[in-house]
Amino acid sequence: MEMLSGAEMVVRSLQDEGIEHIFGYPGGSVLDIYDAIFQSDKIEHYLVRHEQAAVHMADAYSRSTGKVGCVLVTAGPGATNCITGIATAYMDSIPLVVLSGQVPTFWIGDDAFQETDMIGVSRPVVKHSFSCRTAEEIPMAIKKAFYIASTGRPGPVVIELPKDVQNPLNKFPYEYPESVSLRSYNPTLSGHKGQIKRAVAALLSARKPVLYVGGGAIIANASKQVLELAEKLNLPVTNTLMGLGAFPGEHKQFIGMLGMHGNYEANKSMHNADLIFSCGARFDDRVTNNVEKFCPHAKIMHIDIDPTSISKNIHADLPIVGSVEVVLQQMLDLIDETQATNDSESINAWWDQINEWRAKDCLAYKTSETHIKPQQVIQCLYKVTKGDAIVTSDVGQHQMVAAQYYPFKEPRQWINSGGAGTMGFGLPAAMGCKIAFPDRPVVCVTGDGSIQMNIQELSTCMQYNIPLVILLLNNRSLGMVKQWQKMFYGGRQSHSYMDSVPDFVKLSEAYNHIGIKVDKIEELEPALTRAFELKDRVVFVDVAIDPEEHVYPMQIKSGSMEDMYLSKTEKTDA
Amino acid sequence: MRRIIAVLLENESGALSRVVGLFSQRAYNIESLTVSPTNDKTLSRMTITTDVVNHAELEQMMKQLHKLVDVLRVTELTQSAHVERELLLVKVRTVGSEAREEVKRTCDIYRGQIVDITQNLYTIQLTGAGAKLDAFIATMDDASEIVEVVRSGVCGIARGDKALRA
């Protein structure tokens, strides 16, 4: 059998797991692993400028491809810098394996230089973690980590590797395990047959159904089944922020995103539905508004691979544990088998009602002579990219506007931090996507607050020539914070104004990128067109937008789903 | 509602901290927790007593426990016939033969055992359900001066055919 050191085992195990890209930052306790990477021609390593960005890159690499993202960092601060990234992936169920160094086993507990209990620090935000105390454990720990990260409800897994365990002088027999099974971990994939029958019956007899599709449908690659079911039964479909793209954004049965900044027709349909069928969506508080007033007329059906997501916030009348893809296929098969269908007359009447709500045109906005509106920027982006770009975003108003005004055609096209709401996610995420899809246009939609939280990665872009477009909706303030302060805090703008926004054009140029400043609406389309034509450069488009613009619709706090502000002056009568 | 949850989990480093972390992270209440390896040394058995607001909270708690990768089985014991036991060690100060006799009598009534004696101190061991131990401590408090109390927390097992096995 082949004899390898612990450090070599790490690299070989990753290779044997099929890992091609890894994101990280070296340091004392992982030097042996970095030395082994240096000698490997199979794994491409990207050196970031801050470990948090490495995790976001791996995370978005995973979101855009469906593969497991992989990160390598050193002990102590290298590891703790990853925590925000790991928490981001955890909240959105993204499979990652994060390898972190550790001080030698014989120093653990002695407060050695760069010692941090990474297993302890990361515990609340990982699916699982391993600490390897001998080199022989490494291949199995890595195998298990990838298996756990990618199956069931996916999530990040941390592996801690003490320095002495990596020692290049000590060689051990290496064999990468072909398979792994854990007696304590067996995710359920297919739905209970009786529940499938009941779900089909309930769905067919519903007169006002809504298909409520979340990120789980994307993770499970269930878009085909969602589309087939929706079209077969003429069901209205709403997507959560995480589910955008799971159902085509321009499909006539798509009623828009739902929730806090959801479409009027989506929120109205939910509130007035008699059946809500959640496919991999978890009734998050940004969707439900006040749970006491949530959808009073609806029976709730819920498919989720994670039993804890079912009946956590909203009681499910008909729970189905399983993968969205498998369960929907089971339902489709049963529908085909029985040739059953729903009552088209009542569904048509339901559509008449929904179309009335649609006619409200809740995303309409007033343009201005003097200011560029953020909505215009996203609509222009859609036009220039023909709706085909991978769009990553940061967190705030720009994120909501991108979600509302860029109808995503397919899954894995919209990459954002939905659960954790991590500012600073967008740029490294765009880099991760571009590395995964070098031939596709990738754009990071960002704000002047968010972009500065990981702006150092412009340097990584320069080093590896990762060409992408950064589209900054620059309102010289923390827009979403400011919106809340205007609406709920008597307009007191406590620390939400960016007093010294840098010259982003000059900043981009400092990193040898191209910066374009847009102040007038007529400059916007030419700037974006040029940005996407410059395929081998990073182009930073800094658009000065109306600083007073708010995001609407917006649910009214403590209200039901259908209680919304529709503009600064209009709200639903509740 | 007081509930007793039995958990069978991998006997691995970190497994306990994941369970304890889960309870604090999700703001669940732990009244007592005991854990020890089983006859199969690769497995640990844990008994958790908790106070839940309603059945939904209990169900969520059990699902969250089961979600931990190290956990094999989770069950709730109070829903059906079960045995729960707790071990109490209590050290009491006694002065005078009358007091000593009173302590000894109370101890016998509760079927406790005196496991250590010094000139002025008795150490008593008692097992039983929590309520019995509470009552014993209250009685002892009247009969003597309690110096020190240690309780193991509850261990529980289902009666009859039911078993929590891998």
Image (cartoon, coloured by chain):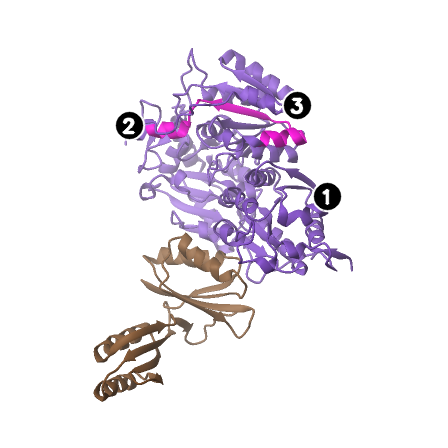
Chain colours: A purple, B brown
- Asked where in the image residue A438 lies, by quadrant, the reply is top right
Q: Quadrant of residue B94?
A: bottom left
For mark 2, name the chain. Answer: A
Name the subunit of mark 3: A
Tell me residue B3's x, y (percent).
Answer: 35, 64
Q: Which residue occupies 45% across, 30% down? A: A400
Residue A113 point in image, percent of width and height: 56, 51
Q: Secondary structure at mark 3?
A: loop
Where residue B38 sits: x, y (%)?
51, 73
| Quarter of the view holding residue A26 | top right
Q: Give the distance between the C-alpha atoms of the residues marked 3 and 1, in whole angstroms.
A: 29 Å
Q: Which mark is residue A535?
A: 3
Note whether B17 is above or below A362 in the view shown: below
The local secondary structure at tag 1 comes to: helix
Count residues near mark 2 (Cα–Cα under 10 Å), then give few for <14, some for 14-19, many for 20+: few
Q: Residue furthest right?
A: A1
Amino acid under disc 2: Gly
Q: Amino acid at mark 3?
A: Lys
Decide if residue A134 is in sight here: yes
The residue that disc 2 covers is A490
Mark toward the viewer: 2 or 3? 2
Q: Nearer the viewer, mark 3 or mark 1?
A: 1
Which segment did they paint magenta? A457-485
Residue placed under numbered mark 1 in the picture: A38
Residue A569's disc is none
Contact (Cβ within 8 Å) of mark 3 with mark 1: no
In the figure, A442 relative to A296: above or below? above
The front one of A566 and A402 is A402
**A302 left or right of A56 in image:** left
